Image (spheres, helix red, strand yellow):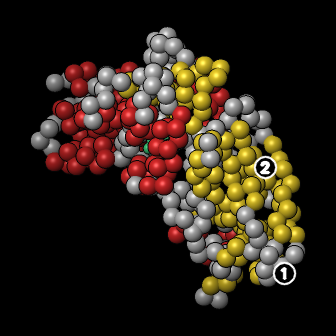
Amino acid sequence: MKLSDVLDLADLSVAARLFVSPLAEHPDLPERLAKMSLLFRGKEQKRDARLLAQAARNLAPEDFRIRVLTDWLNRRAAPLWHFKIIHDRLRNEAYARALTHFVKPGMTVFEIGTGTGILAMLAARAGAAHVYTCERRPEVAQAARDIIARNGLAERISVIAKDACAVQLGADIPERADLFVAEIVDNGLLGENVLALTELARAEFLRPDAILIPQRISTVGYLVSGRGHREAYYMDSTMGFDLTPFNRFAPLVISSGKGGGDVEPLSEAVELYGFDLHADAESAGALQVSLTANQSGVAEGVMRWLRLDFGAGILFENRPPQISSWEPLLHVLPSSRVVSAGDRVDIEVSHTRDQIFIS
Ligand SMILES: C[S@@+](CC[C@H](N)C(=O)[O-])C[C@H]1O[C@@H](n2cnc3c(N)ncnc32)[C@H](O)[C@@H]1O
């Protein structure tokens, strides 16, 4: 067997192709491909790494090390958090309630981000005539197809193994859809490009009056005493050495862990920033928000979490101490501050297209 029998070079990135093409005649091709796979894995080019390892395996199926390498890489084709989110009962139920409420028989649904296919299947179960769902990871898209077929829904759900930006109306989706559903929010709210992707869906794939699930997203938070979170991520003196210059690398935002239940709120929760997904969001914006302490303590940061508003009174919030697949974030204040009940702390909440900052 030669390289072209086991690998379509066009599937690789340009960089990987340039490295691999000259190897075609190498006497120890499987070993070389396996080494190249590890190199690309180290450079975070995971798809290249998987394709190269699989090619090595096809050439040398008996090679134990190559088999271990491909199994290891294939298991990493889907991020581990898929397991976490699928066990997030409150998240799943909120989406299920929204889909049951809004999907009417005969509607077509468009989704960005199939994952396991859970939301597409809920939409089909709610009565959608057809669901078109796109997934940018080809291995995940294939797993979703297998799941959908196993659940008898292959006739009513089309999985498009493409990034949303490459989906084509008229080819992948016959016509604009009546309803859009997506779960593309991260702990920080905007990091998975929910703003740009919802705008893309509205502009290209939805009817003007299409229903959006969710329709409004926001981040809510309060002032907190971190009970040592700050110390955990700052250096001072250790073993008699002053390590403070390392604090230039200290994080400004800490994923709180434990559902944020290990910090003490010092103010009421208020909405810090919200986005109505029916309208195009500004590319950047800033708001002044006042947080009024309702008890005394040492304010070390602002803890914030997500609120997804699906309409019809259906809401999801991972408000501490609620344990969810999404973790609240602790934004550390530049210096801790002693507050008493009634003290006002003014913060600026700003955002770009994919991040929220607090200062
Ligand atoms: C948080 S998961 C949600 C999966 C599933 N809908 C659920 O609710 O369990 C988001 C999914 O969207 C996919 N995704 C993110 N950005 C995408 C894009 N631009 N185009 C297509 N899929 C995308 C990710 O690969 C991931 O599978």
Choose between 166 and 265: the one closer to the eye. 265
Q: Residue 260, percent across and down?
A: 59, 68
Label for residue 243? none
User: Against 358, is 158 above or below?
Assistant: above
Q: Amino acid at mark 1?
A: Ser
**Residue 185 seen in the figure:** yes
Of residues 53 and 281, the one drawn nearer to the viewer in this rendering = 281
User: Which of the image's four quarters has the C terminus?
Assistant: bottom right
Residue situated in front as seen by the camera: 332 or 262: 262
- Looking at the rendered structure, the kind of residue marked 2 is Ser
Judging by the rendered image, the residue that carries numbered circle 1 is 340
Q: Residue furthest left?
A: 62
Quarter of the image with the N terminus in it = top left
Secondary structure of the residue carrying tag 2 is strand
Residue 45 shows in this picture: no
The image shows residue 17 at horizontal and vertical percentages of 40, 26
Query: Disc 1 and disc 2: Cα gap in Å?
Result: 26 Å
Q: Which residue lies at the image location 42% right of the left edge and 29% below the top edge?
A: 127
> For the point 36% across and 47% down, which residue is it?
76
Please report the residue visible at 38 percent of the width from the left and 21 percent of the height from the top: 10
In this picture, is 103 found above or below 358?
A: above
Point out which mark residue 350 bears. Answer: 2
Instruction: Give the class, few, some or many, for how many residues have Cα within 10 Å of label 1's Cα (few <14, many ≥20).
Output: some
